[in-house]
Amino acid sequence: MNESVSRACDILMAFRFEGELLRLRDLVERTGLSKATAFRIVNTLTSRGLIERAGRFQYRSKTRLLQHRSLTLGYAAQTSEFAFSRAVTESIERAAAKEGISLITVNNRYSTKIALRNADLLIREKVALVMEFQIDEHAAPIISGKYREAGIPMIAIEIPHPGAIYYGADNYRAGLMGGRYLGRWAKQHWEGKIDEVILLEVPRAGPLPQSRLAGALQGLKEVLPSAENAAVFRFDCNGQFGRSLHVVRNHLRSTRAQRTLVAAINDPSAIGALRAFEEAGRAQNCAVMGQNASVEARAEMRRLGSRLIGSVGYFPEKYGDGLIPLALEIIHKRHAPPAIFVEHKLVTPDNVDQLYPNDPLLEAAAIDEMLFVPSGAKTGESTLPSEQP
C-alpha cells in the first residue's frame, strides 16, 4: 500500500466513534506519526472534506469507516416476547451495525437459569464487553461476578448489578411523574376523592425498579394530600399481564371501592389490571398509570374511552444510540459515569399521536387482539407474557 495512503488511513482510524473530538496531540499519540506528518495529513484530509475542524485545536472525522470491525460485544436480552424488550434489542443491533461492531445476542427469556447460562456462553465467546438485561436481583451478583472474574466489563440495563455501569430508567423520577398525573386526573374527574390505590409490583426485580411505585405514591400524595386517607394495596404481578389480571380480579371480588387509582410497574401489568376492571363491569371506577409507554400501551391509549390515562415513556428505540458509545468509552478506558438515566416523558391519550406519529395501524390492531383475554382462558393464565419492569 502507498505509504501516504496508509498514514491517512491511520489518521482516520484514530477516531474511534462517531463525533469524537481529537486534538493533534491525540492523533499523534494514537497513530505514532510525528507531529509534522500528522499535521500535514490532517490538513490534506480537511481540505478534501474527510475531516473537519471543530474549534481552533480539535478535529472530527466525517467518514463512516468501520473502525470497530474486529470488536465483538455481547448483549443478553431480557426477552423477545414483547415490545419494550424487543425495541431495546433492535436499537442495540442497529447501533452496533452502524459502528461496524460485531454483536453476539442471546435471549434470557425472563429466566434466571437461562440468564446464568447465557453469561457462561458470552464468557466463552470472549466478548470485549457485555450489556446485560435480566430481571432477577438475586442473580445479579452471580452474573456480575462471572464477568468480573473473566475480566469482561459490563453494562447493566434497567436492573443494577454489582460493579456494573447502570443504564436505564430514573425509576423514582419516572414514578413521581406518573403519580402526579394520577393525582391531577383525580382532581379533575373525581373532585380529588379516591377510595383506594393499587400498586402492582415486581419484588424479584429489587429495590431500584420498585422505587417507581414509591415515587408514584409520593407524587400522588404531593398533588392530592387526601390520598393519605386512601387504602393502599400492593400486589406482586411479576410484570405480567395474566398475573396482574388475576390478582386485581380477585381483589375486585372483595372491595366496594368506587374510585381506585392504579400505578403499575410496567405496561403489561397496567393493562392486565384494566382488563380486570372491565371484566367486572367497573372500568369507570378506575384510572390506571403504566410505565414504559410501550406499543401495547400506546395502542390502548388510542382506544376510545380507555381508562389507561397515561404511561411514562422510556423510548427504548433510542437505547442503542446511548449504549454502544458508552460501551466504546468503557472499552477504551475513558471516563464513564456510574449511571446513565434515559429520557422520560409522560405519554397520554392527548399526546401519544404527537410523540409516536408513525405507530403502524396494523401493529396496533394486532396488539389489541392480543391484549384481550380469549373466552375460556384459565384464571390467572397469562395471554401477555412478561415485560421489563
Image (cartoon, rainbow, N blue to C red):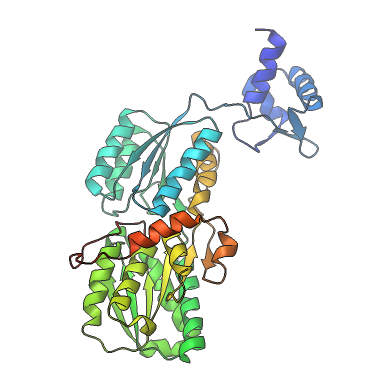
Q: Residue at x 67, y 29 (%)?
A: 63
Q: Give coordinates of residue 370: x percent, y percent.
A: 34, 59
> Can residue 336 be seen in this snapshot?
no
Q: Residue at x 30, y 45 (%)?
A: 108
> Can residue 99 be seen in this snapshot?
yes
Q: 288 or 322, which is in the foreground? A: 288
Horizontal side, residue 100 vs residue 20: left or right = left
Q: Give coordinates of residue 183: x percent, y percent.
A: 47, 82
User: How many marks overall?
Assistant: 0
Q: From this view, report whether residue 302 is shown above or below residue 55.
A: below
Q: Quadrant of the N terminus?
A: top right
Q: From this view, report whether residue 288 is shown above or below residue 107.
A: below
Q: 35 or 353, which is in the foreground? A: 353
Q: Residue at x 79, y 19 (%)?
A: 40
Name the quadrant containing residue 126. top left
Q: Quadrant of the C terminus?
A: bottom left
Horizontal side, residue 375 vs residue 134: left or right = left
Q: Residue at x 47, y 74 (%)?
A: 304
Q: Give coordinates of residue 58: x percent, y percent.
A: 74, 35
Q: 125 or 280, which is in the foreground? A: 280
Horizontal side, residue 385 vs residue 159: left or right = left
Name the quadrant containing residue 227. bottom left
Q: Give coordinates of residue 165: x percent, y percent.
A: 44, 47
Q: From this view, report whether residue 87 is shown above or below residue 48.
A: below
